[in-house]
Every structure is written in structure tokens, then in C-alpha cells.
Image (cartoon, grey):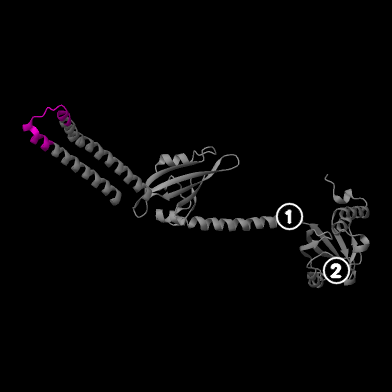
């Protein structure tokens, strides 16, 4: 048979007295008379307000030093006197300047018949730590929202293509430039996977590397020729950076695409210029070598005095032909260099 409370409690009055004493020893509360003056206080209550029992007894609750916004009691007392309970938060400034937040409850207790026999329990609970934590959290959230708003405003004004992915490759953010490049709205893009919807021109091998990033090798980059929604070809430097948790696990990664079309064209033009210069230099070296060799041979014959008088006309014509060829080749080389410098 399961024992009942009545069976366990033989002396109800003694049990009641013990319960009251246990409550009074562990709960911060005061008993108010019908006029809302403090008639009795617990030890915990005295400790909270750092006052003696003599200082507190007889003090109207609305006049308790350190309690702020006590004017609310003037409105509450007539309502609570009708039997309604009230709960709320009140700030208390200690004599040493500390700020304490109290969760308070005001409850009517009928000690007899009629209003003259009504008492009130004023219970308090120190919630300062919770209140401060909530205020700090709210301040942190406000700062975070402000920082996020500034960050979004910053990246929205960037000309780069910016996208943020989770560890599975699902897009969780893209800026307006990314949307314009792909020809899709924010709603259409968010949630799409990088494997299902890729920028045209990015090879799968590069995408796979993004999932292999580590804290020791947190980024990859490469230049690709990509096609936008208007079918325009652009050279894009694609930079991918991994974001890791405290355990070194990849949980997000960001991609930034920068248009380097002009630089790429300049690089290609430079490459073409160098290749063309090498070709003409190769051709010129052969074309110039022939007249120079002829002139060297003629000079050697002159040095050896091996040219007969009747051969001078032939020698002069040969020399003139060599000089004309060299002049022609030098002009062609000059025209080529001018064209490359001022028309590319």
C-alpha cells in the first residue's frame, strides 16, 4: 500500500510549522499588511536589501529605498487588493551602486473575513545574471545584424561574383552580380547545388577540389573562360576559400569570381606579339644573313686584291643589292614593331 501524505503527517500543525520555517529560510519574501506596509521579512529578503529587520518593518513597500519604478505600486495596490495576483520585473540599486534585477510576485492572502484581514506576500527572485545575459545577447545580436548589414552592403556593391556554399555544396548566399551573371534571381539560386548548377565553363575537376580543402590548404584559384546568361565569353579568376570549424572540418566555402577579361586579352596580345616577333626575327635572321654573307665575301676578295678591274661593276651591283635588301628588311621590322605597339 502506497502511503499518503495524511498518513505520514501525524501532527498537521507541526508539519505546517516546519513547512513555513523551511520556506522562510530559503525564499526571499516579505509579508505586507492591508496597507502594503512590511510586516515581516525573511532572512533572504533582508540579505537582498542589506537591511536589518528593524529598518524594514513598517516601511511602505512603495517607499523601499533602492527600488525603481515603485510608482507602479500605486496603480497595482488597488487592483491586487481585489484578489488579483501580479508579477513583474523591478530594478533595485544597492547602496553600493550595484544594479540588481528582481522577478517579483505580489499575492493576496486572506487571513480572515474582509479586507481588514487580508495580507500580501511580496516574493522576489534575483534574476540579474539572466537579465544581464539576455541584454548582452540582445546587444550581440544587434551588433551582429549591424555587421551583417554592413557586410552585405559591402559585398553587394562589389563587381565580383560572390557565392557562399554549405559543406554539401548548396548555395546559401549569392550577391546581385552573381545573379546577373547567371541570369537567375536570388530565390531561384539559393538552395541549388554546385554540381547541379555550375557556372558555364568551370570543370568538375575544379569543383571537386573545393570539397578537399583543409586548414593547411584552405584555398584554390584558377582562370577560366566562362559564359554568362547573355552568352558573352568572359575570363574569370575563380577563387575558392574554405571556412572551417574549431575541429578543422569544412562547413562552408566561399567563391569569388573576378572579371580579368581585359588582363587576359592583354596577356594573349602580349603572347601573340612575342610569337610574331619571334617569327619575324627568325625570318629576318635568315633574310639578313644572306646579304651580310655576300658582303663579307666581297670584302675578303678586296682584302686579297683578287678582283680584276673588269669585275668592279659586278661588285658594285652586288653591294648595292645587299644594301637594298638590308634596308628593306629593316623597314619591314620597324613597321611590324610600330603596328604591334600602337594598334594592339
Q: Residue at horizontal 64%, vertical 55%?
A: 140
Snapshot quadrant of residue 111: bottom right
- In this picture, which residue range is highlighted in magenta? 299-318
User: How far apart are the two marked residues, 1 and 2, measured between alpha carbons?
Assistant: 26 Å
Snapshot quadrant of residue 244: top right
Q: Residue at horizontal 41%, vertical 39%?
A: 205
Q: Which numbered disc flags the more N-terminal residue, 1 or 2?
A: 2
Q: Is residue 271 magenta?
A: no
Q: Is residue 301 above or below residue 117?
A: above
Residue 237 location, x and y as percent?
42, 46
Judged left or right of residue 86, residue 178 is left
Is residue 344 at all visible to an observer of this figure?
no
Does the magenta stretch mainly form a helix, a strand or a loop?
Answer: helix
Instruction: Identify the residue position indicated by label 1 in the image.
Output: 130
Instruction: Identify the residue position indicated by label 2 in the image.
Output: 63
Quarter the N terminus occupies: top right
Judged left or right of residue 324, residue 227 is right
Q: Residue at horizontal 30%, vertical 41%?
A: 274
Q: Nearer the viewer, residue 282 or 235?
A: 282
Residue 273 location, x and y as percent?
30, 44
Judged left or right of residue 270, residue 8 is right
Q: Residue at horizontal 27%, vertical 41%?
A: 277
Q: Is residue 312 magenta?
A: yes
Q: Is residue 253 above or below residue 85?
A: above
Amino acid at each position: 500500500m502506497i502511503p499518503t501524505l495524511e498518513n505520514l503527517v501525524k501532527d498537521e500543525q507541526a508539519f505546517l510549522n516546519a513547512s513555513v520555517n523551511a520556506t522562510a529560510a530559503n525564499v526571499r519574501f516579505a509579508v505586507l499588511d492591508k496597507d502594503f506596509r512590511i510586516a515581516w521579512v525573511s532572512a533572504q529578503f533582508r540579505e537582498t536589501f542589506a537591511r536589518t529587520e528593524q529598518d524594514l518593518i513598517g516601511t511602505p513597500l512603495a517607499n523601499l529605498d533602492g527600488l525603481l519604478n515603485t510608482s507602479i505600486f500605486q496603480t497595482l495596490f488597488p487592483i491586487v487588493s481585489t484578489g488579483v495576483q501580479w508579477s513583474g520585473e523591478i530594478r533595485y540599486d544597492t547602496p553600493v551602486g550595484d544594479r540588481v534585477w528582481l522577478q517579483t510576485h505580489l499575492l493576496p492572502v486572506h487571513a480572515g473575513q474582509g479586507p481588514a484581514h487580508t495580507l500580501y506576500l511580496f516574493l522576489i527572485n534575483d534574476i540579474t545574471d539572466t537579465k544581464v545575459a539576455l541584454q548582452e545577447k540582445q546587444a550581440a545580436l544587434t551588433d551582429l545584424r549591424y555587421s551583417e548589414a554592413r557586410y552585405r552592403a559591402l559585398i553587394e556593391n562589389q563587381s565580383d561574383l560572390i557565392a557562399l556554399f554549405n559543406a554539401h555544396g548548396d548555395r546559401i548566399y549569392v550577391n546581385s552580380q552573381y545573379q546577373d551573371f547567371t541570369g537567375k534571381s536570388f530565390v531561384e539560386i539559393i538552395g541549388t547545388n554546385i554540381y547541379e548548377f555550375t557556372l558555364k565553363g568551370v570543370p568538375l575537376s575544379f569543383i571537386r577540389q573545393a570539397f578537399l580543402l583543409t586548414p593547411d590548404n584552405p584555398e584554390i584559384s584558377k582562370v577560366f573562360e566562362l559564359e554568362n546568361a547573355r552568352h558573352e565569353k568572359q575570363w574569370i579568376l575563380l577563387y575558392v576559400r574554405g571556412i572551417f570549424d574549431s575541429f578543422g572540418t569544412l562547413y562552408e566555402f566561399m567563391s569569388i569570381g573576378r572579371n580579368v577579361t581585359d588582363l587576359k586579352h592583354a596577356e594573349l596580345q602580349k603572347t601573340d606579339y612575342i610569337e610574331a616577333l619571334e617569327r619575324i626575327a627568325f625570318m629576318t635572321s635568315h633574310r639578313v644573313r644572306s646579304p651580310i654573307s655576300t658582303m663579307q665575301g666581297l670584302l675578303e676578295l678586296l682584302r686579297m686584291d683578287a678582283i680584276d678591274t673588269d669585275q668592279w661593276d659586278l661588285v658594285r651591283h652586288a653591294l648595292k643589292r645587299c644594301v637594298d635588301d638590308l634596308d628593306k628588311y629593316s623597314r619591314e621590322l620597324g613597321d611590324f614593331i610600330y603596328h604591334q605597339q600602337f594598334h594592339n
